[in-house]
Image (spheres, coloured by chain):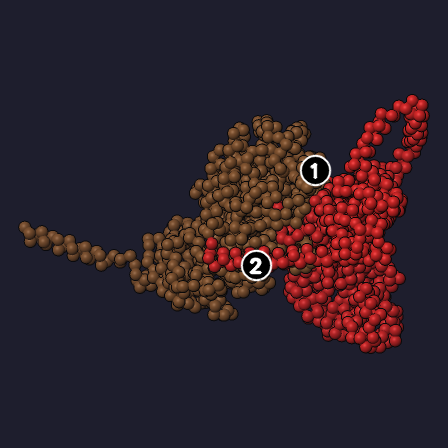
Chain colours: A red, B brown
Amino acid sequence: MRTGIKRMRAIAPLIVLMLIAPLSGLAYADSETPYKTFTVDGYGRMRETQTAYLPLYTFTRIGGETLNLPADLTVTDDGYLYVADAGNSRIVIGTTEGEFVGTMGEGHLVNPRGVFVADNKHVYVADRDAEAVFEFDENGALLNRYTKPASPLYGDTLSFLPIKVVVNKAGIMFIICESNTNGIVEISPTAGGTFLGYFGTNFAATDLRTIIYRAILTDAQRAKMVGNIPATPTNLAIDEDGLIYTVTRGDGAKTLKRLNIAGTNLFRDGAEWYAGSPTAVAAGNHDNVYVVEQPGFIWEYNNEGATLFVFGASDDGTQRVGLSSMIASITVDSNDCLYILDGDQGRIQVYEPTEFTKLLHNALCLYSKGRYTESKEPLTKILEMNSMFDYANRAMGRAYYQEENYETALRYARLAKDYDGYSDAFWEIRNIWLKKNIVLLIFVIAGLWLAFRLIRFWDRKKNILEKPRAVLGKLREKPLISNILYANYYMRHPIDGSYGIAAEGRGGWAAPSVILGAFMLEYVVFKYLCGFLQKTVAEGSYDFFSDFGGILAAMFALTVCNYLVCTINNGEANIKKIYTYFCYSLMPYILLVPVLFALSHVLAANELFVSLLLRIVIYAWALLLAVIGIKEVNNFTAGETAKTIFLTFFTMLIMALLCFIIYVLWAQVFEFVSSLVGEAVYRLGM
Amino acid sequence: MVCKLMKKYIALGAVLLFVFLLIPPAASAQEREGASSGFEGYTLVAESGDYRLYYCEPRFSILLQNKETGTCLESAVSDEKDDGANNKSWTGYMKSGIVLYAIIGTTNTYQVDMLTCKNNIKTSYTKNGLSAAIEFPEYGFALTVEVALEGGDLIVRVPDSSIKEEKKDNYISTVSLFPFFGYSYLDDKEGYMLIPDGNGALIRLNDKEGKYSTGFSRLIYGKDYGFEQTVAVATSELGKSFNFLVEPNEVIAPVFGLAHTDDRQGYLAVVESGDERCSIEAHPNGAMIAYNRCFAKFLLRDIFTQPLNNSNSGTVQSVEAERTHMDLQLRYRLLSGDDANYSGMAASYRDYLLGNGEVALKDTGYNTRVDFLGTDREEFILGTAAVTMTTVENIREMYGRLRSAGVGHVLTVYKGWQSGGFYSLPISGYRADRHIGGTAALTNLIKEAGAEGYKIYLYDQTLRANSATNATTFNAMKMVNKRTYKYESRDEVYRLFYMLMPAAAGNTLRKFTESYINKGVNTLAIDGMSNQLFSYSSRGGYYTRTDTRNAFVNAVASISEKCNLVLEEPFAYMWKYADAFLDMPLASSGYLYADEDVPFLSMVLKGVIPIYSEYINFKANKTESFLKMVESGIYPSFYLTYENSSKLIYTNSNYLYSTEFASYEKTVSQYDAEFSALAKKTEGAFIRRHEKLENGLVKVSYSNGVKIYVNYSGAALKADGIIVKALSYEAGE
């Protein structure tokens, strides 16, 4: 199971590089909390930030009552905690300060796994071992007992093992049942419990392998395969608007879902970062949502499913307030205090939001309601406290955009890596610029055209350009220059150009190398300095070494492998010629990438198809040149060419494999020597 | 004549003999039994002005009685107080005045005590105590424990020379002296144990109802890097990629305390010798047994893991070849009456430190601490490029702005000033980075600003070495298993750091300071040497934390003669060299079993050395931190940069998420106004008493009569006729 791993973007390598071990004394550990708080920046990277929630206190018992393997808890708006004390088969009611108020459900409950308190104060309990959902009134009197629905739609063979329950304002119950993979069971209270159907069904992940297996295996074999069934949601919560949140273990980016009444997931893209082993979810008071992960992490997401905070940690044995050993449930009270139930230790930890988080919630609220300008005030304070908090930068950018302050919006959007916001602001700025300068622009173009005509006219009359022409002509005759320029000819007339390489010895070593150099230069310039919207690497990160190294290694492998294959296939090219045609094939890239580069600085997001088109042209053209080069210079037939290309790639693969094996062997040798030394150090006590 | 003389001699002899018979010789145990005490099994061995010391030889236990009140502190559980709920091993532990742990082979779980192990004990009595030679023949161990009652102090000492390990493959791992001294059963006594966690914390002696399986157990002066390579223990994928856990605070001072507030009796214990390798233990009831106890556990020898290859797939367990050689000495400062509380403990420790020259009174005048980051590096074309955050000119400008806002005194620790930026380590010479303006400009700034009361201290980490900026292979510290100690970072620019060996670190520091002093400036902030301690191995030799401590103390002492030093979270033995204590924790680590935080260390040092807080611009709760500083007499600290901190995003300093000067300018001058006014009132005074009043108000009384009331609650509170507004404070006479 992959957990907590974001969907990789182009900057994935950067994340991979975030290695092991902490560095003692490097960061400022705030001694008030035993854990750090992280947020996710615009690139989707985890960044440390101010403490979002402080551990307030921990209570190990409610009044004098000890909890035994509690499974769930919920808090009401008027400040009462209801805990499903599974080990003691009861519901324990206490105040949020941990004072004992009463118990409920003794004699009825067997193994209460989930508890929910409706607005009318009715308490709903999902009891797995009693195979029923109980409804008690405020005083603990049993009102209803909902057992397995009789409806054939439920499934005759399915058992009814309710573990979590929530109830909407109409009194309809949404029940998660253990080992029921059809989805959340939806039961209406009418007629002693009417089964309405399944809700928010998860989908089974189908990978390529499963599809292939299904296609080729016999029925008997297929029956033996592990069943590919969707996962049951782990937990659920309901917010004020009746939207239902579910968490499902092992559902990747779709771990957290926000379902409307039709069962549609409103978090379409899924979360960038998600809890790998979620155990519970709670809806916040500001369209936000909390998810807890069993080992001790607490996540807060905004209304778009983007991560605001992750904090918490597993108890390292030091027994500090705020560390958890096995989180079972979470609930949020009206003051945004979090109550986290540690099932293992049978204790409840209370966390309160810090000043920073309170500001954020305020901004969150205003922003989600579209009151952008008002949200600027708390956002400014947040950015004063943490200028790298990208969520605030992004919201700030949007707010300025609404105010038509596009320059500032652009700056914030770029800081926040908000591509859509950036593109919108950029479009506006460009529009304004164009409006202002369109006349001037036309004049400049016209002027240039005129100047060009004038010079040509004079040249024809008085031959004023004779000298430069002569110099250029002389230059052209130099073999190096001539061979470089021949690449241009090759690009436009590849078949004829190939003849030049094969028969006239055009190319050589120097000229193609110059072209390769130019290619590398353009490659890195484009990679690091192109427009923000087209950038595939994080701003400020440079890795020229592997850029150059990669290109050179690829070119070397291509040339050598192609040479090996060509020689045994009676190809006529020698290694110099092969090198030449591969380098010459890069010519479209060299000529057209500057255009692409310029475009990247003037196009907004919705016009990027132009540059995509250009890219396709460049790559297709370069590929074509290489293929024609192989065919013509070696004097191959079409069939032979195809075979050669295939074999070349195969050889490259073998070569890579060989390098890998040699590397592994060397590592073994190194390891052996170092073990020997280690042993010697130990034995001889040096 | 002769006869007469003979008679005289005989008479004299007879008188002498008579006298000799009358006066008991310096006590045999038998006779002591006669002077029985009313405490079963105990005999009186010494007496001072206020206390009587009793001794029970078979269990090597002592009992201290307050003459005036008759209340006692006992060092082993008596039979009548035995709750009978414990196994043989625990019973042996509880009823023994000394408990050793033995290593046999490579296992260190053998408990050696007076009850479960065969032992020979020979006690001789001195004029104010006793000296007991104890042998454990089964293990071949022997040691002598000396106990002396000197005025108001009880001193317990094991001379290093008396410790013997005479059986092959049997080693002493730890020695706990009087592990139950002042114990109590469940909630029998009112009071608390003081633990040196963070600024200080209390474990109340109430019934913990078995909630906690362990108590406080931390090595004094932090963990030993020579034994532990910091490795993230990941419990989940997320935990593997990121380190969420914050390490608990290190133990800065070698003390712990106990107060029985109902008996008005207690002590503050100071580990006087052997503190470099000793842990403070304080366990509340419920941690295995139903007794509260606190003690010092000396570590003589440890087990370590010797890897045999690079992947660490093959390892063997080894025992240290040589044990630590040091006297083990504990001093219990006995407290009674009004002093038997944490305020009394703080005062007692302060008197002790001042009396022994462990601290000297320094100028505690107020400064607002505003630190700056000069420059760091980010990756750029095959190398790195400077990211300059605060230049010398920037500082001049910011100082000007602060001065015009009325800020009178500033203390600045300038970080990342050195050539190559913050992580160009170690610093071996005075060369400022050209991006901040160069050496000459920096020197001028320090001199000019200093003349106007704005002191700039250059920051030196002293122990850390960056593998990417400096060639350090030969100076890198090797752990006891002869593997080089590595710090690994997951940041993008620099990923691997080493620790310098003490000698190399000392030389580097000396070289730097010489070139620094040559320019006529001498203000320095030292980190690393002030707050880290490790064992290490070098060229076949093995060096203990004592060696390291001596090396660090020598280095710091020699430069402190020529320089003004401020020290980063210094350990107790460095305090005397510090003109200021930087980064004092405001709170404790928040252990579940600790019931409340008390500003113990600030109470000890307030009025002795100026104390500065951790950086408050990273605090999420500003008001609370502010009040904490007011309460504990700590001065505020900021870590700022001229540029916006988002520039740091691709550097190793990317954890600095909020440092822009412009955002904090106002806060700095506000804090300066508040704290300088407050500091004027308490200048030169010690904290006499710190108490939490019934209504939740905190009252701090100073020796000059000033009282400060701090209100953390959301409603106004009243005490002594003074009304304190919500989340605010008041100062009164």
Q: Residue at x 75, y 63 (%)?
A: A249
Residue nearer the viewer, B529 or A170: B529
Task: Give the vertical position of A128 relative to A275 (above or below).
Answer: below
Residue type, numbered disc 1: Glu
Q: Chain of mark 1?
A: B
Q: Label 2, on which residue?
A: A672
Pointer 1 local density, CA inside 10 Å: few below 14, some 14–19, many at least 20 = many
Residue sticking out furthest to the top: A462
* Discs 1, 2 touching: Cβ within 8 Å: no
User: x and y percent of residue B287 in the render?
Assistant: 55, 63
Residue B440 shows in this picture = yes
Residue nearer the viewer, A486 or A360: A486
Write down the quadrant of residue B383 in the picture. top right
Pointer 2 local density, CA inside 10 Å: few below 14, some 14–19, many at least 20 = some
Q: Are marks 1 and 2 on the same chain?
A: no
Q: Residue at x 22, y 57 (%)?
A: B20
Write down the quadrant of residue B623 in the picture. top right
Query: Quick one: SS at disc 2?
Result: helix
